[in-house]
Amino acid sequence: MSEALIIAGPCAAESREQLLQTATQLADAGVGVFRAGVWKPRTEPDAFEGVGEEALSWLAEAQQLTSIPAATEVATPEHVRLALKHGIRILWLGARTTTNPFLVQQIADSLTQEANTLTVLVKNPVSPDLKLWKGAIERIRKAGVKQIYAVHRGFQTGQPSPYRNAPVWSVPFALKLAVPDIPLILDPSHMSGDAALVPDLSRKAMTLGYDGLMIEAHCNPQAAKSDNKQQLTTDQLKQLISSLPCRKSSSSSKMENVTEKQTETYDTLSLLRQQLDETDDTLFLLLLQRMQISKQIGVFKRQHNLPVLQEKRYAELLAKRLAWAEQHELDEEIIRRILDAIHEESCRWQL
Ligand code: PEP
Ligand code: MN
Protein backbone atom coordinates (compact mmCIF):
# COMPACT_ATOMS: atom_id res chain seq x y z
CA MET A 1 0.00 0.00 0.00
CA SER A 2 1.22 3.39 -0.91
CA GLU A 3 1.36 6.25 1.57
CA ALA A 4 0.34 8.64 -1.17
CA LEU A 5 -3.02 10.42 -1.06
CA ILE A 6 -5.44 8.76 -3.47
CA ILE A 7 -8.29 10.90 -4.72
CA ALA A 8 -10.68 8.85 -6.84
CA GLY A 9 -14.21 8.77 -8.15
CA PRO A 10 -16.17 9.33 -11.33
CA CYS A 11 -15.60 12.22 -13.70
CA ALA A 12 -19.16 13.35 -12.98
CA ALA A 13 -22.02 12.61 -10.63
CA GLU A 14 -24.63 11.33 -13.10
CA SER A 15 -27.34 9.83 -10.91
CA ARG A 16 -27.78 9.01 -7.21
CA GLU A 17 -27.49 5.32 -8.01
CA GLN A 18 -24.28 5.66 -10.06
CA LEU A 19 -22.64 7.87 -7.45
CA LEU A 20 -23.51 5.75 -4.41
CA GLN A 21 -22.63 2.53 -6.20
CA THR A 22 -19.19 3.88 -7.18
CA ALA A 23 -18.60 5.27 -3.69
CA THR A 24 -19.51 2.04 -1.88
CA GLN A 25 -17.37 -0.02 -4.28
CA LEU A 26 -14.45 2.24 -3.42
CA ALA A 27 -15.11 2.37 0.32
CA ASP A 28 -12.42 -0.17 1.21
CA ALA A 29 -9.98 0.61 -1.62
CA GLY A 30 -7.67 2.93 0.29
CA VAL A 31 -9.16 6.07 -1.25
CA GLY A 32 -8.55 9.19 0.87
CA VAL A 33 -10.89 11.53 -0.99
CA PHE A 34 -13.91 10.69 -3.16
CA ARG A 35 -14.21 12.95 -6.22
CA ALA A 36 -17.12 13.71 -8.55
CA GLY A 37 -17.84 16.68 -10.79
CA VAL A 38 -21.23 18.28 -10.31
CA TRP A 39 -20.72 21.11 -12.80
CA LYS A 40 -18.68 20.01 -15.81
CA PRO A 41 -16.79 22.61 -17.86
CA ARG A 42 -17.20 21.24 -21.38
CA THR A 43 -15.42 22.24 -24.54
CA GLU A 44 -18.46 21.55 -26.71
CA PRO A 45 -21.88 23.02 -25.89
CA ASP A 46 -23.96 19.86 -26.32
CA ALA A 47 -21.82 17.67 -24.03
CA PHE A 48 -23.08 16.55 -20.61
CA GLU A 49 -22.64 19.55 -18.33
CA GLY A 50 -23.32 17.88 -14.99
CA VAL A 51 -26.44 17.58 -12.88
CA GLY A 52 -25.81 20.68 -10.76
CA GLU A 53 -26.96 21.30 -7.20
CA GLU A 54 -29.10 18.16 -6.89
CA ALA A 55 -25.94 16.03 -7.23
CA LEU A 56 -24.39 17.76 -4.21
CA SER A 57 -26.88 16.02 -1.95
CA TRP A 58 -25.87 12.64 -3.44
CA LEU A 59 -22.25 13.54 -2.86
CA ALA A 60 -23.02 14.44 0.76
CA GLU A 61 -24.81 11.10 1.09
CA ALA A 62 -21.78 9.24 -0.30
CA GLN A 63 -19.58 11.08 2.17
CA GLN A 64 -21.81 10.02 5.05
CA LEU A 65 -22.13 6.46 3.85
CA THR A 66 -18.42 5.74 3.38
CA SER A 67 -16.86 8.24 5.84
CA ILE A 68 -14.57 9.28 2.98
CA PRO A 69 -14.53 13.08 2.50
CA ALA A 70 -15.89 14.17 -0.87
CA ALA A 71 -14.54 16.73 -3.32
CA THR A 72 -16.07 18.57 -6.23
CA GLU A 73 -15.08 21.19 -8.83
CA VAL A 74 -16.03 24.82 -8.33
CA ALA A 75 -15.81 27.43 -11.06
CA THR A 76 -17.78 30.33 -9.57
CA PRO A 77 -18.46 31.80 -6.10
CA GLU A 78 -22.01 30.42 -6.42
CA HIS A 79 -20.61 26.90 -6.81
CA VAL A 80 -18.57 27.46 -3.64
CA ARG A 81 -21.63 28.62 -1.74
CA LEU A 82 -23.68 25.61 -2.80
CA ALA A 83 -20.89 23.08 -2.15
CA LEU A 84 -20.37 24.45 1.37
CA LYS A 85 -24.13 24.47 1.97
CA HIS A 86 -24.12 20.71 1.29
CA GLY A 87 -21.13 20.04 3.52
CA ILE A 88 -18.55 19.49 0.75
CA ARG A 89 -15.33 20.96 2.12
CA ILE A 90 -12.78 19.79 -0.43
CA LEU A 91 -12.99 21.85 -3.60
CA TRP A 92 -10.98 21.83 -6.77
CA LEU A 93 -10.34 24.44 -9.43
CA GLY A 94 -10.34 22.89 -12.91
CA ALA A 95 -7.75 23.59 -15.58
CA ARG A 96 -10.02 26.02 -17.41
CA THR A 97 -10.68 27.97 -14.23
CA THR A 98 -7.02 28.21 -13.16
CA THR A 99 -6.42 29.73 -16.60
CA ASN A 100 -8.52 32.79 -15.63
CA PRO A 101 -7.13 34.99 -12.80
CA PHE A 102 -10.42 36.96 -12.54
CA LEU A 103 -12.35 33.79 -11.77
CA VAL A 104 -9.68 32.46 -9.42
CA GLN A 105 -9.76 35.71 -7.46
CA GLN A 106 -13.56 35.68 -7.23
CA ILE A 107 -13.45 32.10 -5.95
CA ALA A 108 -10.66 32.97 -3.50
CA ASP A 109 -12.73 35.87 -2.15
CA SER A 110 -15.70 33.56 -1.65
CA LEU A 111 -13.59 31.20 0.46
CA THR A 112 -12.29 33.63 3.06
CA GLN A 113 -14.96 33.14 5.74
CA GLU A 114 -14.41 29.39 6.03
CA ALA A 115 -10.88 29.25 4.62
CA ASN A 116 -9.37 27.68 7.72
CA THR A 117 -11.39 24.50 7.43
CA LEU A 118 -11.31 24.00 3.67
CA THR A 119 -9.03 22.05 1.37
CA VAL A 120 -8.51 23.38 -2.15
CA LEU A 121 -6.91 21.53 -5.05
CA VAL A 122 -5.61 23.72 -7.85
CA LYS A 123 -5.29 22.00 -11.22
CA ASN A 124 -2.68 23.28 -13.64
CA PRO A 125 -3.91 25.80 -16.25
CA VAL A 126 -4.55 24.58 -19.80
CA SER A 127 -1.27 25.98 -21.12
CA PRO A 128 2.16 25.23 -19.59
CA ASP A 129 2.33 28.55 -17.75
CA LEU A 130 4.06 28.13 -14.40
CA LYS A 131 3.25 31.65 -13.20
CA LEU A 132 -0.46 31.26 -13.87
CA TRP A 133 -0.54 28.02 -11.82
CA LYS A 134 1.55 29.44 -9.00
CA GLY A 135 -0.46 32.68 -9.08
CA ALA A 136 -3.72 30.75 -8.62
CA ILE A 137 -2.24 28.87 -5.66
CA GLU A 138 -1.10 32.16 -4.13
CA ARG A 139 -4.55 33.74 -4.55
CA ILE A 140 -6.11 30.78 -2.71
CA ARG A 141 -3.42 30.92 -0.04
CA LYS A 142 -3.95 34.66 0.47
CA ALA A 143 -7.63 33.94 1.08
CA GLY A 144 -6.51 32.04 4.19
CA VAL A 145 -6.73 28.45 2.93
CA LYS A 146 -4.09 26.32 4.65
CA GLN A 147 -4.64 22.98 2.93
CA ILE A 148 -3.76 23.48 -0.71
CA TYR A 149 -2.72 20.84 -3.24
CA ALA A 150 -1.45 21.33 -6.78
CA VAL A 151 -2.86 18.87 -9.32
CA HIS A 152 -0.85 18.18 -12.46
CA ARG A 153 -3.22 17.08 -15.26
CA GLY A 154 -1.06 17.99 -18.25
CA PHE A 155 -1.09 20.78 -20.82
CA GLN A 156 -2.22 21.59 -24.32
CA THR A 157 1.00 22.41 -26.11
CA GLY A 158 0.02 22.02 -29.74
CA GLN A 159 2.85 19.46 -30.01
CA PRO A 160 2.25 15.77 -30.71
CA SER A 161 2.04 13.68 -27.53
CA PRO A 162 1.00 10.12 -26.69
CA TYR A 163 -1.31 11.68 -24.11
CA ARG A 164 -4.37 13.87 -24.42
CA ASN A 165 -2.57 16.51 -22.37
CA ALA A 166 1.23 16.62 -22.53
CA PRO A 167 2.95 16.23 -19.13
CA VAL A 168 5.70 18.89 -19.67
CA TRP A 169 7.30 17.57 -16.45
CA SER A 170 9.54 20.63 -16.10
CA VAL A 171 6.52 22.78 -15.13
CA PRO A 172 5.36 20.79 -12.06
CA PHE A 173 9.00 20.34 -11.02
CA ALA A 174 9.54 24.10 -11.20
CA LEU A 175 6.32 24.59 -9.21
CA LYS A 176 7.62 22.20 -6.54
CA LEU A 177 10.79 24.29 -6.28
CA ALA A 178 8.83 27.54 -6.14
CA VAL A 179 6.29 26.39 -3.53
CA PRO A 180 7.87 23.35 -1.84
CA ASP A 181 5.25 23.12 0.91
CA ILE A 182 2.41 22.53 -1.57
CA PRO A 183 1.92 18.78 -2.13
CA LEU A 184 1.86 17.74 -5.76
CA ILE A 185 -0.75 15.31 -7.09
CA LEU A 186 -0.81 13.71 -10.55
CA ASP A 187 -4.08 13.31 -12.45
CA PRO A 188 -3.17 10.52 -14.91
CA SER A 189 -6.79 10.29 -16.12
CA HIS A 190 -7.04 13.75 -17.65
CA MET A 191 -3.39 13.67 -18.65
CA SER A 192 -3.63 10.45 -20.66
CA GLY A 193 -7.27 10.51 -21.70
CA ASP A 194 -6.97 6.71 -21.86
CA ALA A 195 -7.66 4.18 -19.07
CA ALA A 196 -4.97 1.84 -20.46
CA LEU A 197 -2.27 4.46 -19.84
CA VAL A 198 -3.36 5.37 -16.30
CA PRO A 199 -1.49 2.62 -14.36
CA ASP A 200 1.95 3.34 -15.87
CA LEU A 201 1.57 7.08 -15.41
CA SER A 202 0.48 6.53 -11.80
CA ARG A 203 3.52 4.39 -11.02
CA LYS A 204 5.77 6.91 -12.74
CA ALA A 205 4.36 9.66 -10.52
CA MET A 206 5.14 7.63 -7.40
CA THR A 207 8.69 7.02 -8.58
CA LEU A 208 9.11 10.72 -9.31
CA GLY A 209 8.07 11.61 -5.75
CA TYR A 210 4.54 12.92 -6.27
CA ASP A 211 2.45 13.16 -3.11
CA GLY A 212 -0.64 11.53 -4.52
CA LEU A 213 -2.92 10.74 -7.44
CA MET A 214 -6.33 11.89 -8.66
CA ILE A 215 -7.85 9.08 -10.70
CA GLU A 216 -11.23 8.77 -12.37
CA ALA A 217 -13.09 5.54 -11.56
CA HIS A 218 -16.69 4.67 -12.37
CA CYS A 219 -18.97 1.73 -11.53
CA ASN A 220 -19.59 1.32 -15.28
CA PRO A 221 -17.08 3.38 -17.31
CA GLN A 222 -18.54 2.38 -20.68
CA ALA A 223 -21.82 4.04 -19.79
CA ALA A 224 -20.20 7.18 -18.35
CA LYS A 225 -21.64 10.44 -19.66
CA SER A 226 -18.24 12.14 -19.78
CA ASP A 227 -14.63 11.00 -20.16
CA ASN A 228 -15.73 7.37 -20.65
CA LYS A 229 -12.44 6.31 -22.29
CA GLN A 230 -10.26 7.31 -19.37
CA GLN A 231 -12.24 6.08 -16.35
CA LEU A 232 -11.13 2.88 -14.62
CA THR A 233 -13.55 0.32 -13.26
CA THR A 234 -13.55 0.27 -9.47
CA ASP A 235 -11.79 -3.15 -9.58
CA GLN A 236 -9.09 -1.79 -11.88
CA LEU A 237 -8.57 1.08 -9.46
CA LYS A 238 -8.23 -1.26 -6.48
CA GLN A 239 -5.71 -3.35 -8.38
CA LEU A 240 -3.76 -0.25 -9.32
CA ILE A 241 -3.67 1.08 -5.75
CA SER A 242 -2.36 -2.22 -4.41
CA SER A 243 0.36 -2.29 -7.08
CA LEU A 244 1.74 1.18 -6.39
CA PRO A 245 5.33 1.25 -5.14
CA CYS A 246 5.41 1.99 -1.42
CA ARG A 247 7.03 5.36 -0.94
CA LYS A 248 7.47 8.22 1.46
CA SER A 249 6.03 11.53 0.28
CA SER A 250 8.56 14.16 -0.76
CA SER A 251 6.56 16.95 0.89
CA SER A 252 8.74 18.78 3.38
CA SER A 253 5.86 18.66 5.88
CA LYS A 254 5.94 14.87 5.80
CA MET A 255 9.71 14.50 5.70
CA GLU A 256 10.20 14.71 9.46
CA ASN A 257 9.76 11.10 10.47
CA VAL A 258 12.28 9.56 8.16
CA THR A 259 13.19 6.04 9.24
CA GLU A 260 16.68 4.58 9.09
CA LYS A 261 15.88 2.64 5.95
CA GLN A 262 14.63 5.78 4.27
CA THR A 263 17.73 7.73 5.33
CA GLU A 264 19.72 5.10 3.49
CA THR A 265 17.50 5.60 0.46
CA TYR A 266 18.01 9.35 0.53
CA ASP A 267 21.81 8.87 0.76
CA THR A 268 21.73 6.69 -2.31
CA LEU A 269 19.60 9.32 -3.94
CA SER A 270 22.04 12.12 -3.14
CA LEU A 271 24.86 10.05 -4.62
CA LEU A 272 22.93 9.51 -7.80
CA ARG A 273 22.14 13.20 -7.94
CA GLN A 274 25.79 14.01 -7.63
CA GLN A 275 26.53 11.75 -10.59
CA LEU A 276 23.79 13.49 -12.50
CA ASP A 277 25.27 16.92 -11.76
CA GLU A 278 28.67 15.77 -12.91
CA THR A 279 27.25 14.39 -16.12
CA ASP A 280 25.52 17.73 -16.72
CA ASP A 281 28.85 19.53 -16.18
CA THR A 282 30.38 17.43 -18.94
CA LEU A 283 27.37 17.83 -21.17
CA PHE A 284 27.42 21.62 -20.99
CA LEU A 285 31.19 21.85 -21.41
CA LEU A 286 30.86 19.76 -24.56
CA LEU A 287 28.11 22.08 -25.70
CA LEU A 288 30.43 25.06 -25.26
CA GLN A 289 33.14 23.23 -27.16
CA ARG A 290 30.66 22.58 -29.98
CA MET A 291 29.73 26.27 -30.17
CA GLN A 292 33.39 27.26 -30.36
CA ILE A 293 33.82 24.94 -33.35
CA SER A 294 30.70 26.52 -34.91
CA LYS A 295 32.28 29.93 -34.51
CA GLN A 296 35.34 28.77 -36.48
CA ILE A 297 33.04 27.35 -39.16
CA GLY A 298 31.31 30.74 -39.26
CA VAL A 299 34.61 32.48 -39.95
CA PHE A 300 35.43 29.98 -42.68
CA LYS A 301 32.01 30.38 -44.35
CA ARG A 302 32.30 34.14 -44.33
CA GLN A 303 35.76 34.00 -45.92
CA HIS A 304 34.44 31.75 -48.66
CA ASN A 305 31.07 33.44 -49.14
CA LEU A 306 29.05 30.42 -48.06
CA PRO A 307 25.60 30.69 -46.41
CA VAL A 308 25.32 29.94 -42.68
CA LEU A 309 22.21 27.80 -43.08
CA GLN A 310 22.86 24.75 -45.22
CA GLU A 311 19.60 22.80 -45.14
CA LYS A 312 20.87 19.60 -46.76
CA ARG A 313 23.69 19.29 -44.22
CA TYR A 314 21.29 19.82 -41.31
CA ALA A 315 18.80 17.28 -42.68
CA GLU A 316 21.60 14.67 -42.89
CA LEU A 317 22.79 15.44 -39.38
CA LEU A 318 19.26 15.20 -38.02
CA ALA A 319 18.52 11.91 -39.80
CA LYS A 320 21.70 10.38 -38.41
CA ARG A 321 20.90 11.38 -34.81
CA LEU A 322 17.27 10.28 -35.06
CA ALA A 323 18.33 6.84 -36.28
CA TRP A 324 20.73 6.67 -33.35
CA ALA A 325 17.99 7.79 -30.95
CA GLU A 326 15.75 5.01 -32.17
CA GLN A 327 18.49 2.42 -31.64
CA HIS A 328 18.89 3.56 -28.06
CA GLU A 329 15.18 3.87 -27.31
CA LEU A 330 15.37 7.61 -26.86
CA ASP A 331 12.26 9.60 -27.70
CA GLU A 332 12.73 10.84 -31.25
CA GLU A 333 10.64 13.94 -30.76
CA ILE A 334 12.69 15.01 -27.72
CA ILE A 335 15.98 14.37 -29.55
CA ARG A 336 14.70 16.38 -32.50
CA ARG A 337 13.85 19.29 -30.20
CA ILE A 338 17.27 19.14 -28.52
CA LEU A 339 19.02 19.11 -31.90
CA ASP A 340 16.87 21.94 -33.23
CA ALA A 341 17.77 24.04 -30.20
CA ILE A 342 21.49 23.24 -30.53
CA HIS A 343 21.38 24.01 -34.25
CA GLU A 344 19.65 27.33 -33.64
CA GLU A 345 22.29 28.39 -31.12
CA SER A 346 25.03 27.07 -33.40
CA CYS A 347 23.79 29.30 -36.27
CA ARG A 348 23.91 32.26 -33.89
CA TRP A 349 27.56 31.51 -33.06
CA GLN A 350 28.39 31.19 -36.76
CA LEU A 351 26.94 34.65 -37.33
C1 PEP B 1 -12.18 16.91 -13.90
O1 PEP B 1 -11.37 16.69 -13.00
O2 PEP B 1 -13.22 16.29 -14.05
C2 PEP B 1 -11.83 17.94 -14.91
C3 PEP B 1 -12.75 18.53 -15.65
O3 PEP B 1 -10.54 18.14 -14.99
P1 PEP B 1 -9.67 19.25 -15.77
O4 PEP B 1 -10.02 20.55 -15.20
O5 PEP B 1 -8.30 18.78 -15.42
O6 PEP B 1 -9.97 19.10 -17.23
MN1 MN C 1 -13.21 14.11 -16.25
Image (cartoon, rainbow, N blue to C red):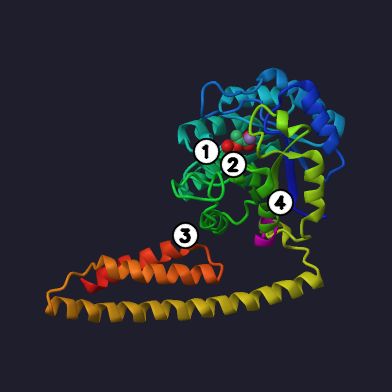
Circles 4 and 3: CB atoms closer than 8 Å: no
At label 1, the amino acid type is Thr
Kindly indicate the quadrant of the structure image that contains residue 107: top right
**Can I make out residue 147 in this image?**
no
Tell which circle, 4 or 3, labels the residue nearer the N-terminal end: 4
The total of numbered circles placed on residues is: 4
The numbered dot on residue 333 is 3
Give whichever of 20, 4 is nearer the camera: 20
The verdict on residue 230 being magenta is no
Magenta span: 205-210
Image mark for residue 351: none
Q: Is ligand 1 closer than 8 angstroms to the Cβ of mark 1?
A: yes
Please report the residue visible at 80 percent of the width from the left and 55 percent of the height from the top.
Answer: 243
| Amino acid type, label 3 | Glu
Q: Which residue is at a point 46% across and 81% down the rendered structure image?
A: 282
User: At which x and y percent is residue 71?
Assistant: 71, 34
Identify the element where label 4 is drawn. helix
Kindly report which numbered mark, 3 or 1, lies closer to the viewer in this rendering.
Answer: 3
Q: Is residue 149 left or right of residue 298?
A: right
Local crowd size for mark 4, using a 10 Å CA cut-off: few (<14), some (14–19), many (≥20): many
Does the magenta segment cover residue 208? Answer: yes
Residue that mark 2 sits on: 122
Q: CA distance from mark 3 to mark 2?
A: 30 Å
Question: Residue, x 47% and y 36% (percent of image)?
Answer: 101
Q: Is residue 148 above or below residue 319?
A: above
Of the two numbered discs 4 and 1 in the rendering, the one whose residue sits closer to the viewer:
4
Q: Which residue is mark 1?
A: 98
Q: Give the vertical position of 94 relative to 209 (above or below).
A: above
Secondary element at image label 2: strand
Q: Sequence order check: which comes first, mark 3 or mark 1?
A: 1
Is there a contact, CB below 8 Å, between mark 2 and mark 1? yes
